[in-house]
Image (spheres, rainbow, N blue to C red):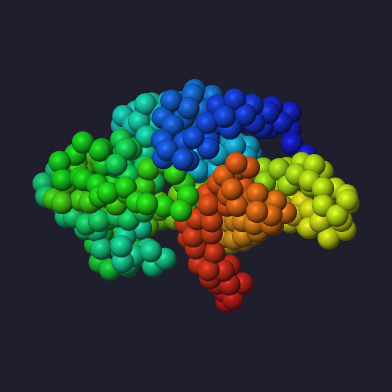
Amino acid sequence: MDFGLSEEQAALVEMAQAFAARELAPEAAHWDAQEIFPEAALRRAAGLGMAAITVSEAAGGAGLGRLEAALVFEALAEACPSTAAYLSIHNMVATLVDRFGSDAQRQRFLPDLVTMASFASYCLTEPDAGSDAASLRTRARLDGDAYVLDGAKAFVSGGGRSDLYLVMARTGDPGARGISAFLVEADRPGLSFGAQEKKLGWHSQPTAPVHLDACRVPVANRLGAEGQGFEIAMVGLDGDRIGIAACSLGAGRACLARALAHVRERRQFGQELAGFQSVQFTLADMATELEAARLLVHKAALALDAGAADATALVAMAKRLATDTGFAVIDRALQLFGGYGYLRDHGIERFFRDARVHQILEGTNQIMRLIIARRLLRP
């Protein structure tokens, strides 16, 4: 077992960190305060291959694995977790098109996804189908050479701005086997958007409901076979759980670094905060827990790429641990800053707000526990 990075992986991390320091960190607070979707910065990231990390080279992507994707997203999230998370979601859609799409679909959609000439969104959750995703009600009725989609999707990252929406809709009976996946362009008649959501964090990416009202989508836009949509959705979530876990690690690492600098500078009771044993213990726990979570994320990423039988459970473990750990580390960093941590000046509160949703999206951490338990208790 080799826990070190290869030369290529180390170079990838260095590239992503340099990009984050140059393109994301100087603007992240501004994007957050003004709720700006940084399209130009995202496209510059795409120019370095970061919009299609796990898309095959034959389709124009970087052709790398989930581990490399995790390394990139952790590095980007050190500067802006919100923007890094959107990149992870976009990567998920592009990778699903590459994996499940026909040759015609890959040729039609991937060139613009790879360059981010087109932005992509993933539409599974509904107002009444969150954790119970298989109960979704959006319907797709076959009518000649097209499907007619009716329904609504909730909490769509990129909603109202993305150019392509991967929509899960029911084509058959109740349950997972009755769901199919569709690639819906933003300009399709019958596709519309609700008002932008007022969120705690993730301000650098738009989030809005997606409405489908007699939206005609060609049969040629169905991704995979009819009835394969839930499988496609779950494959996508496994991958993006690694991405979101990595974003939590990056946010936690950034706040640990800020905390380390702060306790060396801040003096109380005649000495640096770093001189107090209680502070030292807190910092030691923060670093240890981040390191442990990172190892599990990397193991899960490798298992997923290898097609290991326990990959989904390992991914659930990694997502649960990394998102809980990342948020806990940020919270302790904020506490070490005292009242200053509550102010926007030091940036801790932005990471706090951005990272909180990681424990909810792509399957809540309670659902992650269910996935793990079902694997453990399987006959």
Q: Considering the image in quadrants, where does the C terminus appear?
A: bottom right
Of residues 108 and 329, the one nearer the viewer is: 329
Of residues 56 and 139, the one nearer the viewer is: 139
Q: Is residue 86 left or right of residue 314?
A: left
In the rendering, at what x and y percent does residue 16 appear?
61, 30
Q: Is residue 323 left or right of residue 152?
A: right
- Quarter of the image for residue 89 reads top left
In the rendering, at what x and y percent does residue 264 appear?
82, 43
Of residues 289 and 220, the one nearer the viewer is: 289
Total of numbered circles in the picture? 0
- Quarter of the image for residue 250 reads top right
Instruction: Tell me if I can see residue 12 in this picture.
Output: no
Residue shown at 18% from the left, 55% from the top: 150
Residue shown at 57% from the left, 44% from the top: 344
In the rendering, at what x and y percent does residue 18 appear?
64, 26
Instruction: Tell me if I can see residue 265 in this picture.
Output: yes
Residue shown at 11% from the left, 46% from the top: 144
- Quarter of the image for residue 221 reads top left
Residue shown at 25% from the left, 63% from the top: 137
